[in-house]
Amino acid sequence: MTNSMFGGPGRFYRGNLHTHSTASDGVLSPGEVCRRYAAEGYDFISLTDHFVGLYDYPITDTLPYRTNSFTTIPGAELHSGAIANGELWHILAVGLPFDFTPSNSPGLRPVDDQETGPGLARRARDAGAFVAIAHPHWSGLSDEDARSIDAAHAVEVYNYGCDVDCDRGYGLQTLDLLLTEGRRLSLCATDDAHFATADHFGGWVMVRAEANEPEALLTALKAGDFYSSQGPDFSNIVLEGDEVVVDCSPVSTVILQGPAHPTSAVHGKGIEGARLPLGRLKDAPWLRLTLIDGEGKRAWSNPLWRDGP
Ligand SMILES: [Zn+2]
Ligand SMILES: [Zn+2]
């Protein structure tokens, strides 16, 4: 949610940051996954197969499937170490080098003497990746677990596959807790598509970048120059005095949030813009916005920090 994001150079590119293929436990080949996302109108995806020994630590090569209008960012879903409930860490890493050193992660269960999840996340960030805490609700992530990932750029606040198959798709509570504790995090919506069920084309990011190229997209992701959606679109967000001014695709609700419970909301039919008074959010250190359309589909801005990026 940066004021410059909508007026600066470049345009928005639609992408899915979390996808699986036959290189791990997905149903479709990497080429077919890319073909389907391109055919659906996506500008880019990251294939993020499970980076464990069971699948020979894949960082799936999607370079052959790039076209003039569709690109790919090499990535993986990283796993090592146990979270508080005894399950394995799931960490999204978009923009990994192909020679990223594997952790000792034989399968999808934790084993003794593994690298910790926070340590693996740090290595991925240092290697150039955009790192997100994956599906916190589905994992059963504790607040302490979430706090321990100090290398994360983002929290995956919507995972379509976890929503469709488990009714545990959301991670907004984890995000808001960390924001309220001062963590400068973005949020992302993804598919986590495996194509065994209807788990695709339901959550995505709209990234403002100067070109539909992996480096430009990664730079924008790390800078927070994107929003996340299940359907609606933001076209402008400006903080003007004591109001946040929003322009958007037609929706029925626009909500301004900050720490704790004070919010500001506008409801109606076919709303394409709103002026939301800060009210009790006047001194809030961060603000974010939610759009909800007539079908209940949402879009979320990244947090805007009042004292600058
Ligand atoms: Zn996962
Ligand atoms: Zn996944």
Image: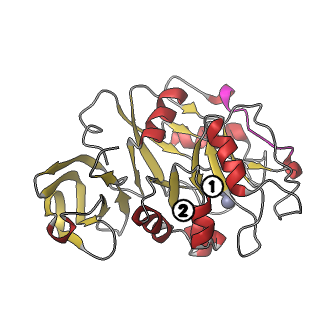
Marked residue nearer the N-terminal end (2 or 1): 2
Q: Is residue 62 magenta?
A: yes
Query: What residue would you read off at disc 1?
Result: 193
- The answer to whether marks 2 and 1 mark residues whose Cβ atoms lie closer than 8 Å is yes
SS class, disc 2: helix
Q: x, y percentage for residue 259?
A: 33, 69
Q: x, y percentage for residue 232?
A: 33, 55
- The CA span between labels 2 and 1 is 8 Å
Asked where in the image residue 176 lies, by quadrant, the reply is bottom left
Asked where in the image residue 293 lies, by quadrant, the reply is bottom left
Against 56, residue 173 (above or below) is below
Q: Is residue 68 magenta?
A: no
Could you tell me how many numbered marks the image carries? Answer: 2
Residue that appears at 83% across and 65% down: 109
Asked if ligand 2 lies within 8 A of label 2, the reply is no
Query: What residue would you read off at disc 2?
Result: 160
Residue that appears at 49% across and 58% down: 202
**Image quadrant occupied by the C terminus:** top left
